[in-house]
Image (cartoon, rainbow, N blue to C red):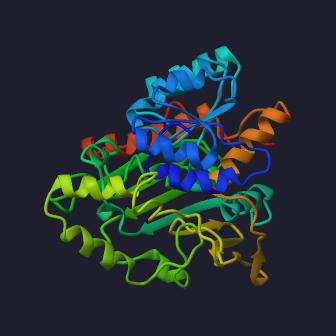
Amino acid sequence: MAGLGVASTQILPPVSKLPYVKVAAAADTRRDALDKFHNEYGAEVFTSFEAMCDSPNVDFVYIATPNDLHAKHAIAAAERGKHVIVEKPMAMTLDECEAMNAAAEKHGVKLLCGHTHSFDPPIRKIREIVASGELGKLRMIHTWNYNEFMYRPRMRHELAMSHGVVLNQGPHHVDVVRLIGGGMVKSVRATTGVWDAARGHEGSYVCYLEFEDGAAATLVYSGYGFFDTAELFGWVGEGGQPRAPETNANVRKRLSGISSAQEEEMLKEQMRYGGRREGEFSHDWQGERHQPFFGFTLVSCDKGDIRQSPDGLIVYGEEGRREVALPGGKRGREAEVDELYQAITQNRPVFHDGRWGEATLEVCLAMLESAKEKREIYMKHQRPVANH
């Protein structure tokens, strides 16, 4: 585990339960977090990422360090023969993506780009239905997500580095749409919004994508905490857990009570691994859970429409409305690690590999470029959905 921040509190609980995974090591700069990790998992701890990757006990590294270190750390791991899962966004630039892919290919390691909601069973099932052709040609994909993202506690650099929601939440949206649409985005036109001067970075976007085959998609996101798309599905949250109707208001209210950037950073620090509020936004829900929802997604084909229901999909076709139940299955980080494990043990390519991750980042960066320059941006690094 590279980085014991908030993401690690969401990654470690489900991944550590997989029968073929042993949590072997962690690297971080905080000694108290490393001490707790060592006591909890009986694992090695390091203050140097490279030293952790030199350990013979490590087979793959889950990189959840700050975004601007993703490329450096993925390349260092590949050079030491370690397979890699890297958190979204894959990197900060396409040149960094190219360097990461070159290192993985040169050293013969698997590079998987996560974590996004394209791993969710409902999204994969929608892709299966679309690819089967039973509803005819894909025409449109519309996906909306409204939540309180901009008012969750942040370190000072976080919103600037991720351009608010665009590089943090955008990869979820883009991966979902690219998977359903076949991967090959032709062009991007977008606008972004900075509506709260106190937060100062992009908290919303509206994006229009056109695929090579003519299908179109819209992606709409607002993290300003008023309307919540969970309301449309009986208050089922992003990870499939119950979401309280007052969540947005409570999160906004808590932030309004913070008097300084230092106080906000202290609150965020408490949410990291080993902190007093560890796992506050974790999706490792232990109670009843439905399908995961990254907002509302509606897919339209010649002969019907598809959307999620709390426990599956609803297909609206020429013969009426039918519901497709879905088993729980692996989701999120479990699904990512399972994909990497299967690829390694069966000696086959990773689907969500570095080339897929680069194509997703290209779309996200194009959203920023399009919003700034007010023009359509054409893609050069897209990758089709693989069949396996």
- Residue drawn at point x = 60 percent, y = 16 percent: 79
Q: Nearer the viewer, residue 82 or 92?
A: 82
- Residue drawn at point x = 39 percent, y = 39 percent: 30
- Residue drawn at point x = 65 percent, y = 14 percent: 106
Q: Nearer the viewer, residue 148 or 16?
A: 16
Q: Is residue 266 above or below residue 337?
A: below
Q: Nearer the viewer, residue 86 or 309?
A: 86
In which quadrant of the rendered image does the N terminus lie? top right
Q: Count the numbered circles shown.
A: 0
Residue 87 percent coordinates (x, y)? 52, 42
Q: Where, by quadrant of the figure, is residue 195 drawn?
A: bottom left
Specify whether residue 214 is in view: no
Residue 170 percent coordinates (x, y)? 44, 51
Q: Where, by quadrant of the figure, is residue 388 drawn?
A: top right
Residue 239 percent coordinates (x, y)? 57, 67
Q: Nearer the viewer, residue 371 or 285?
A: 285
Residue 373 percent coordinates (x, y)? 26, 41
